[in-house]
Amino acid sequence: TTTRPGHDRPHSLPDHVRHLVVGAGFAGLCAAIQLAQDGEHDLLVIEKGDDVGGTWRDNTYPGAACDVPSQLYSFSFAPNPDWSMSFSPQPEIQAYLRRVARESGTLDRFRFRTALVSAGWDEDAQRWRVEVEDGSGRHTLTAQTLVVAAGGLSEPRLPDIDGIEDFGGELFHSARWRHDVDLTGKRVAVIGTGASAIQIIPEIQRRAGHLDVYQRTAPYVLPRRDRRYGRLERLALRHLPGLQRLYRTAIYWGRESYVPGFTRQPRLALPAKRLALANLERGVSDPELRARLTPTFEIGCKRILISNSYYPALDAENVEVVTDPIARVTPDAVVSEDGTERPVDVLVVATGFFTTELPITERLTGRDGRTLAEQWRTGGMEAYKGTTVPGFPNLFMLVGPNTGLGHSSMVFIIESQVAYLRAAVRTMRQHRYAAVEPTPAATRTWNADLQHRMRRTVWSTGGCSSWYLDAHGRNTTLWPRATFTFRRLLAEFDVAAYAVRAPHPGPT
Ligand code: N01
């Protein structure tokens, strides 16, 4: 038996599946739906949470919304005429993903509250041996392909601050919002001023008695050109599918034509920089505070943020922006390096995620017995086309190394990667390959080219440190070229870049 002694196999978990997808966010959903559309019904999706949605299930903090317009930040195969705003709030995106999952007819292939414990490639069987854990215990199964769609921004990173573990009030990460903690009238502190924090801060400022914002680096914040879709416009979008496609295309090209340009040509970013500084000037009346909120690096080096309410919130009477570094946390206060102790009831850490040392890589063991984390420890994360990895046959990573975007829709990237996965699966069926694995040479060439391109971008030269860069200063998270180039390069499965294995004698 493949079950652990003492545990009956729940009938819902098979011994073997052809395709095992880990994660049910945008990427996992896309993979499951499109594989099923191709007739690949022997598939299973495991999800450690209790719902689909991934980041949009987890990030429920007040003010959570997407800063990419929803007409583009949605599946091309599942348009939604009902977005209420151009930049949709989190509950709407989550409802959209639930609806898409339900209507796809694939939900019976999903197992929720089921986490990946480990997955190791079995070279003899030419399969992945996978251990999962659900409410009833641990179970093993095998899979021919393993699609890791666990997200690039899914594991919260808590700040390593002296004494923080002894804090006696409420403390939580932005991605694990505690809705049971009432902030009304409380002394609240937020650590961080990234994309999450700037959405949270205006909401907290309205409720809290006092708010301290601990800023390590001031971000650039552009005005948020959001708008509500009127009734007539929504009607038109519903009945004229061509209009939705037009919106989507216009938004896509609007972003695409600007973003790749300015990452390499700082002068193209000057209008955006002026706009961000004017936004600061308009939002903050106190010149001394404005000076502290003025970024000291090139625009675009970190993610450019958008908000109309962030600066006015910081300018409010009940808010203090603390730029003196945090020295330590006591059971009831945050102490900055100048010795000032600021009492706090609730500490919100909006300090981001593990991005270059993904915890899931500790759980994946390749052909030679090394984990992916070990393989990446020396040289940093790298994959072939951001998707496949030497030593890890039949592993497909969605939102893998160098596939992230600063300022366009990750859904576009995800659909491109899923197209590549589908093409690989078709090739494997057609030629009866048991396994495909990218060659080290192809992977080296791909990454050398990426890193060469990275050297000239604002992410490397802009004078900031960001989650885009790893401990060696290499940008292993972002895609440095146009997104349509990514799509073109992944449109077909380039089997010449792969070592292929003949079918094994057992059942598939
Ligand atoms: O995290 P971040 P995030 N002491 O890593 C600070 C996406 N997203 O959750 O800049 C003090 O960007 C850190 O300071 P510094 C989006 O891709 C999208 O905000 O490193 N401060 C920074 O200010 C985004 O980029 C949406 O000096 C500490 C902040 O914490 C990504 O998620 C919305 C610290 C972390 O910022 C991550 O955003 C929200 C310490 N020890 C997020 N450690 C959309 O709208 C860290 N910081 C789509």
Image (tube, rainbow, N blue to C red):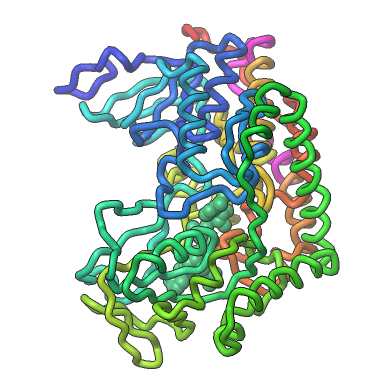
Q: Nearer the viewer, residue 451 or 64?
A: 64
Left or right: 9, with 442 as reference point: left
Q: In the picture shown, does residue 95 fall above or below 461? A: above
* Residue 415 pos. (x, y %): 65, 31
Q: Is residue 385 visible?
A: yes
Quadrant including the N terminus: top left
Residue 107 magenta: no
Q: Identify whether 101 is placed above or below 321.
A: above
> Which image quarter: residue 393?
top right
Residue depicted at 70% across the width and 41% down the height: 443
Q: Which residue is depicted at the point 32% across and 59% down?
A: 172
Looking at the image, how many numbered discs can be counted on the residues?
A: 0
Magenta stretch bounds:
428-444
Visible residue check, residue 420: no
Residue drawn at x 74%, y 36% as measured from the top left: 247
Out of 404 and 268, give the one closest to the viewer: 268
What is the quadrant of residue 499 in the picture? top right
Q: Nearer the viewer, residue 275 or 474?
A: 275
Residue 433 drawn in magenta = yes
